Image: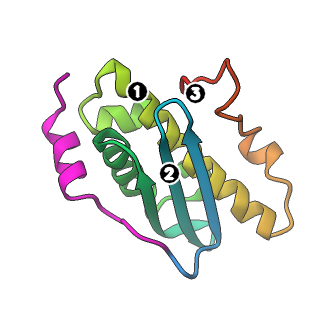
Amino acid sequence: MAYSEKVMEHFANPRNVGELPDANGVGEVGNPKCGDIMRMYIRVEDNVIRDVSFKTFGCGAAIATSSMATELIKGKTIDEALQLTNRAVMEALDGLPPVKVHCSVLAEQAIKAAVSDYYRRLGIDPVPIVGELHDCEEEACACGG
């Protein structure tokens, strides 16, 4: 199982690690089969993600995908952030081994969970905007959970 240089760089030197005490939205997702847990924090001003951070407990691929995902949404509008797919995260990292694709799915889900929390805090139902967030404990979960 070979990792790209970008995966190794984001694992060894992750960007945006930590908590945002003034976060407008916090989302946490996990995969019970592999034990990865991602928590994403966003600070939004004028519909733009001005700051983002993460705390991830998991393998190197989980940390790398969290790091890359935060880099890809920082400075983007909420709508642009919601368009980020796990495939885009993998492409930005020059790929992931097939057994680690679930890590990029978790990164996508963590962003959506943080945005959902942001909308809830504003008193807005997030489901029409973000969609239903699935439970990774479901047997048919796309992330393999």
Identified at 45% across, 55% down, the residue is 73
Quarter holding residue 56: bottom left
Amino acid under disc 3: Gly
Residue identified by numbered label 3: 145
Amino acid under disc 2: Met
Asked if 22 appears above or below 106 in the picture, the reply is below
Marks 1 and 2 sit apart, C-alpha to C-alpha, by 15 Å
Amino acid under disc 1: Val
Marks 2 and 3 sit apart, C-alpha to C-alpha, by 14 Å
Residue identified by numbered label 1: 101
User: Which residue is more in the foreground, 78 or 142?
Assistant: 142
Badge 2, how many Cα within 10 Å: few under 14, some, many 20+? many
- Under tag 2, what secondary structure? strand
Residue 33 in view: yes
Q: Which residues are magenta?
A: 1-19
Q: Earlier in the sequence, mark 1 or mark 2?
A: 2
Residue identified by numbered label 2: 38
